[in-house]
């Protein structure tokens, strides 16, 4: 392949956009089958392309890092639906705070106990603890508590994609109908990627999910180091 063509940020951006659009096409053709979520299939397409054509990762990362740069602003932009539903926040303030607190603590404790039960190395347990918060916060927390940030990113992606794909089915199985409860559950468990699905389900769900990302991130940052010491 032409090295000059690869040695530019546009290469990573174009490959990522093409892969996502192929994934989206397959998702629509398969009638939105959860396992063919475009976030999953596009990742596999990019990996296969890099492996088949033996493209050095540093070439792809030049464009990939630009895409990652917009992750934090995109997360902040989720505050817009929250602003439009500010009255719902006021009406349900206490349930939202308590639900977010319980959800964030449960996510941390479940990782610690399951990790110890399965005999997983402590450094991997620490890497998995931030799995349910958004990527920029998760990477910082992972480094702070002695985890491995790249593994944390992988865990965050898997968690987000799983939540995005399975959220409607989980709500249906457990008969969760209240839009505030749906949004909080999705946001706390699967951060910004799950919030994208919550927005599809409704504006209230999207607003509550966006709010829970912030609350869960703050709680996890405070509680995770304490729970690690206690447990």
Image: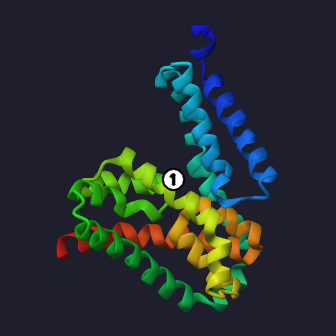
Q: Position of residue 94 (x, y in %)?
A: 54, 91
Q: Position of residue 25 (x, y in %)?
A: 79, 45
Q: Position of residue 153 (x, y in %)?
A: 44, 49
Of 221 and 155, the residue lying toward us: 155
Work out whether 78 lies above or below 107: above
Q: Position of residue 35 (x, y in %)?
A: 63, 56
Badge 1, how many Cα within 10 Å: few under 14, some, many 20+? many
How many numbered badges does the structure rendering display?
Answer: 1
> Residue at position x 50%, y 61% from top?
159
The N terminus sits in image quarter: top right
Q: How is the protein colored in the picture? A: rainbow
Evaluate whether residue 221 shows in this view. yes
Work out whether 93 lies above or below 66: below
Work out whether 70 lies above or below 186: above
Which residue in the structure is indicated by mark 1? 157
Of 23 and 196, the residue lying toward us: 23
The C terminus sits in image quarter: bottom left
Residue pushed farthest front? 30
- Helix or strand or loop: what does disc 1 sit on? helix
Of 100 and 171, the residue lying toward us: 171
Evaluate whether residue 78 shows in this view. no
Tell me where residue 219 sits by quadrant.
bottom left
> Residue at position x 60%, y 48% from top?
40
């Amino acid at each position: 392949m032409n090295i000059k063509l690869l040695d530019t940020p546009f290469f990573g951006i174009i490959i990522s956009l093409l892969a996502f659009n192929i994934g989206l096409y397959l998702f629509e053709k398969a009638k939105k089958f959860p396992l063919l979520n475009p976030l999953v299939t596009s990742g596999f397409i990019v990996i296969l392309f890099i492996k088949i054509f033996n493209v050095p990762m540093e070439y792809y990362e030049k464009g990939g890092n630009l895409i990652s740069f917009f992750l934090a602003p995109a997360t902040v932009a989720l505050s817009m639906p929250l602003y439009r539903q500010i009255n719902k926040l006021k009406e349900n303030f206490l349930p939202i705070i308590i639900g977010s607190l319980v959800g964030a603590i449960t996510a941390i404790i479940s990782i610690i106990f399951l990790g110890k039960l399965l005999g997983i190395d402590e450094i991997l347990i620490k890497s998995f603890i931030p799995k349910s918060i958004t990527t920029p916060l998760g990477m910082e927390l992972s480094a702070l508590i002695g985890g491995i940030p790249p593994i944390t990113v992988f865990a965050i992606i898997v968690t987000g994609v799983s939540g995005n794909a399975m959220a409607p089915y989980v709500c249906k199985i457990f008969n969760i109908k209240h839009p505030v409860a749906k949004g909080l559950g999705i946001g706390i468990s699967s951060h910004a990627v799950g919030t994208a699905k919550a927005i599809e389900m409704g504006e209230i769900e999207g607003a509550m999910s966006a709010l829970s990302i912030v609350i869960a991130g703050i709680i996890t940052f405070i509680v995770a180091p304490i729970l690690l010491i206690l447990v």
